[in-house]
Image: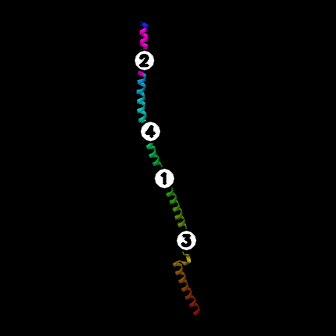
Amino acid sequence: MKNILIALFILLNGVCYSQNIDSLKTELLKVYQTKIKSQDSVIIALDAQVISLNSVIKKQDFIISSDSLTFKLYDHQILLYERNIKLYDDHLKAVKPKFWESKPFNFIMGAGTILLGSWVTKNVLN
């Protein structure tokens, strides 16, 4: 009788245990499926964020490239302005009046000519 009860308990335990495992498996499967669905929605949201951030990066790269082009243009304009300044300096050196073209020198030459002319005239007539 004792052996029969032990065998009966073992069989009942095995049957009950297998039913619990099947129900546990289905419950775990449902839980994992809901977790996977929620993680899929999170992954989709993160993918959308990655796409939007990639578009922001592309816009920033475009702005940086246009800024660098603007800086190159400004550098070129600065170079042209420096050349113009050099040309103006060279032109001023070429056009600058010489010492014999200045007003004080011309005044002195005029006065000297008058004095020399009057002195020569005075000496010739005497």
Please report the residue visible at 42 percent of the width from the left and 16 percent of the height from the top.
13
Query: Which residue position is annotated with label 4?
Result: 43
Query: Which residue position is annotated with label 1?
Result: 62
Label whose residue precedes the other's in the sequence (1 or 3)? 1
Please report the residue visible at 56 percent of the width from the left and 69 percent of the height from the top.
90
Callout 1 crowding tier (Cα within 10 Å): few <14, some 14–19, many ≥20: few
Label whose residue precedes the other's in the sequence (2 or 1)? 2
Please report the residue visible at 43 percent of the width from the left and 8 percent of the height from the top.
4
Marks 4 and 2, how far apart at CA: 41 Å
Judged from the image, the secondary structure of the residue bearing numbered disc 2 is helix
Is residue 126 visible in the rendered structure shown here?
no
12 is higher (above) or lower (below) than 44:
above
Front residue (pair 85, 24): 24
State the predominant SS element of the stretch in magenta: helix
Q: Is residue 111 magenta?
A: no
Marks 2 and 1, how far apart at CA: 69 Å
Q: Amino acid at mark 3?
A: His
> Residue reaching furthest bottom?
125
Query: Which residue position is annotated with label 3?
Result: 91
- Splitting the image into 4 quarters, where does residue 113 fall? bottom right
- Splitting the image into 4 quarters, where does residue 89 fall? bottom right
Estimate the x, y position of residue 1 in percent, counting from the top left: 41, 6
Label whose residue precedes the other's in the sequence (4 or 1)? 4
> Residue reaching furthest right?
124
Dot in front, 2 or 1: 2
Q: Give, as a single range, the part of the protein colored magenta.
A: 4-20
Query: Which residue position is annotated with label 2?
Result: 15
- Residues tagged 1 and 3 counted as in contact (Cβ below 8 A): no
